[in-house]
Image (tube, helix red, strand yellow):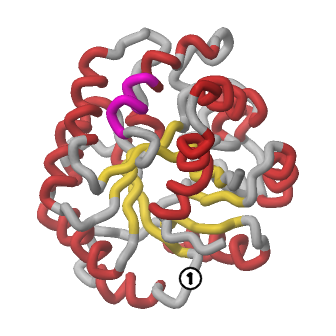
Amino acid sequence: MLKIDGHQHFWKYNPERDDWITEDMAVLREDYLPQQLEPLLKQHGFSGSVVIQSAQNREENIFQLKNAVKHEFIKGVVGWVDLQAEDIEKRLESLMPYEKLKGFRHVLQGEKDRALMLSPAFQRGISALTRYGYTYDLLILPDQLVYARELVSAHPNQAFIVDHLAKPAIKAQDIDEWAEDIKSLAQHENVYCKASGMVTEADMQHWKKEDFRPYLDVLFETFGTGRLIFGSDWPVCLLAASYAEVFGVMDAYLKSFSKDEQAQFWGLNALDFYQISI
C-alpha cells in the first residue's frame, strides 16, 4: 500500500528565526534534515513525504526546494509567499519552474488579527493561488474556523487543507464547539483535512490512543476517507511522541476500515490533493 507522509518539516535551527521554539521545546533546538527522516519513512513503509514550511521568508522556499531536488523521497513542498504583496502574481510566476512546489502556507494561527484571512489583500493572494494552480494549507486554531468557513466559501475553486485538525483542545477534552465548526467547514468539497499534530495538543507526557478517538470519529464521519491525509508533523511530534508512536495512533484507528479506505488515507488522497506524480 502506497504511503505518503503529508506533513513534516526540515530546518537548520536558528534561534533568532525560530523563536517559536521556546525553552520547553529543547528537543527541537537542533537541525532536522532529510537524512534523519528518510530511514523513519522507510521503516514504516512510506514512499515519500510532503515538507511544509516553518519559516516565513523567501529563503525558506530555496532551502526546502534544494532539499527536494537532492532527495527523491520529498514528493512535494509547501512553501511561503507573502499573499498580501501587491506583486503576488509576479512572485508566483517566478516560482512556477519548480515542479515540486505544490502550495503555500501562512502561520495564521499566530496572527493578532484572527480574521486576517478575510482581508481584501489576503483574499487577492488566495485568488492568485487559484489561477496558478497552487494549494493552500490552513494553519489555524479553533477560534478561526468560522473565518476559514467564510474564506473557503468565497474561493470554491481553491484547494484548501486544514492542518492538525485546526488544533482542538484534546488535553482538555474540549470537543463540542470544535466539532460543530469543523463539520460546517467540511461541507465545502474543496476542503481537505490532515490527521496530524494531535499528540502535541494532548497531554504530551501521558496521552493514550483513546484520547484521540472522539476527534478522529468526527473527522472521518465529516470528511470521509476521501478527504483526509496522514501527517506525522515530524519533528514537532517529538515533543510528545516518536515517529513510530504517531504512526501507531492512526494504524490502530484504521484497523476496521477497508483496504481501499486505508489506501485513500495513507497515500492516494495526498497524491490527489498535492498533484503528486509517483
Q: Nearer the viewer, residue 49 or 27?
A: 49
Q: Find residue 245 and report its image quarter.
A: top right
Q: Is residue 207 above or below residue 82?
A: above
Q: Tag 1's secondary structure?
A: loop
By secondary structure, the bulk of the magenta-drawn segment is best described as helix
Q: Nearer the viewer, residue 19 or 267?
A: 267
Q: Find residue 162 and report its image quarter.
A: top left
At which x and y percent is residue 10? Answer: 68, 56
- Residue 221 in the figure: left or right of residue 29: left
Image point (21%, 51%), residue name? 116
Q: Is residue 219 magenta?
A: yes
Image point (60%, 48%), residue name? 263
Residue 53 in sight in this render: no
At which x and y percent is residue 241? Answer: 71, 26
Residue 2 in sight in this render: yes
Image point (66%, 24%), residue name? 252
Q: Is residue 268 magenta?
A: no
Q: Find residue 17 and report its image quarter.
A: bottom right
Q: Is residue 74 above or below residue 225?
A: below
State the extent of the magenta-drawn residues as a range: 217-223
Q: Is residue 127 above or below residue 21?
A: below
Instruction: Give the amino acid type for the residue marked by disc 1 in the picture.
Output: Glu
Image point (54%, 38%), residue name? 196
- Residue 135 in the figure: left or right of residue 35: left
At which x and y percent is residue 133? Answer: 36, 77
Which residue carries the number 1 mark? 99
Q: Residues within 10 Å of mark 1 (few under 14, many from 20)?
A: few
